[in-house]
Amino acid sequence: MTAAATPRTILHVDLDAFYAAVEVREQPSLAGRPVVVGADPKGGRGRGVVSAASYEARRFGIHSAQPIGRAYSLCPDAVFLPPRMELYLAVSQRFFALLERFTDLVEPLSVDEAFLDVTGSERLHGDGPTIARAIQRAVRDEERLSVSVGVAPCKFVAKIASDLRKPAGLVVVDGAPGAAAAFLAPLPLERLWGAGPKTAARLHQLGARTIGDVAALAPSHLAAAFGGDGGAHLQALARAMDDRPVEPERAAKSLGREHTFEVDVADRDEVARLLLALVEQLTARLRRHGLAGRTVTVKLRTDDFETVTRAATLESAVDTTEALLPVARKLLSRCDTTRRAIRLVGVSLSHFGAVQPALFEEKAVRQGRAVARAVDELCARFGEGVVTRGSLLDRAPPGPDVGPKPRPPRAPPERNG
Ligand SMILES: [Mg+2]
């Protein structure tokens, strides 16, 4: 038996059909139409997959990770759009800034979802459901996007709750003892976090169908199938026992951003643009938390799931795109030795320390920090997103099949070391 911990109020906040919703917001004429973001369907002969589908498209059976040709055959009249990661990442950044108004304890889970521990915010902002509704209102008013929220006494249950009534759903699970387990019990066991198809199949073999069945299984049966630790972990989740804390980025030893392409990408210009967007987002987060780091790590995964990382440690800690990007680019080129299509790109910074007042910093880096500070200040006063770096906007206007190919970002000034 675990000792009763202090009751917590955890929110899981998840934007609805994120990429597709951003596209509809940017092109209001698309409202109400089936919108599919992903690979070019090429009249049904396209390769690659769906990255995101609007709820209208989902009514045709279209869903993310589905082959794009299949999506096309389900609804040839849908609007098919290529993904615009820079745009989505910029929206994502404002979304996280918005969440941080409600609590310091925000843990990003991906570009469009986060855990919040609002236990300490309730005196200021009201109880969990009140905060959840305030977040939904703010996201709707400021971003014109809809978001679903789960409120629960632990992370795992909050995550399941947010998914139950999408879009714009709010599901509240009481914090009273036993309430969370009772909430989970009737749900299919496929909803257990981490229960992939193999785990689910083995649980079915043990006679379980629901999460409640898993909670009631004999621990010895679970241990025989999943090992002692694995079985205990599954059963703890099924019983809503999850005391993992919400871990905000600023408490982390490293800070990173990575992105998995839904469709593996061969075009190195696209990879370079993604790296820039990731670095922009990362440095903005660093400055927001007052952090700067010396060790830069770049991660690259190719379409055959080979992952390569390369790291470099700088003489002084950095927190600007101007300082970080040239290093990240060099590391990326050292990772990218095959000509295979690319699946994932990540960049992170660790080894935190103070930014040196830079006697030896090159002028571009000093100017970069001055620009970054000015941008941060404007964002603090007028909201993030009022200022966006020109090179991020250096693209053709949106459209499914119009406009020139976007140019890669301008080369930054080269830097030694
Ligand atoms: Mg989402």
Image: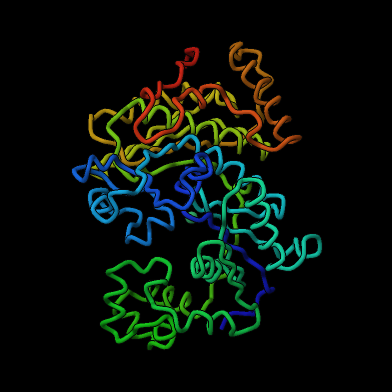
Tell me residue 233's x, y (percent): 43, 73
Direction from residue 10 to residue 52 in the image, left or right: left
Q: How many marks?
A: 0
Q: Is residue 317 visible?
A: no
Q: Is residue 281 above or below residue 16?
A: above
The reply to whether residue 148 is in sight is yes
> Residue 278 in the image: x percent, y percent?
49, 35
Q: How is the image coloured?
A: rainbow
Classify 318 as above or below 96.
above
Farthest residue to the right: give it: 123
Residue occupying image coordinates x 54% and y 41%: 255
Pick the front one: 406 or 252: 406
Task: Locate residue 113 relative to residue 70 in the image: left or right.
Answer: right
- Quadrant of the rendered structure where residue 200 is? bottom left
At x 42% / y 88%, what residue is drawn?
216
Q: Residue 352 occupies which quadrant of the picture?
A: top right
Outermost residue on the left side: it is: 45
Residue 88 image point, x, y percent: 50, 41
Q: Pick whichever, 243 or 26, lies toward us.
A: 26
Residue 403: give x, y in percent of width and height.
Answer: 38, 25
Front-most of 107 and 38?
38
Dividing the image into 4 quarters, which one contains the N terminus?
bottom right
Is 105 located above or below residue 260 in the figure? below
**Vertical order, 361 against 117 (above or below):** above
Instruction: Give the side of residue 38 with respect to residue 251, left or right.
Output: left
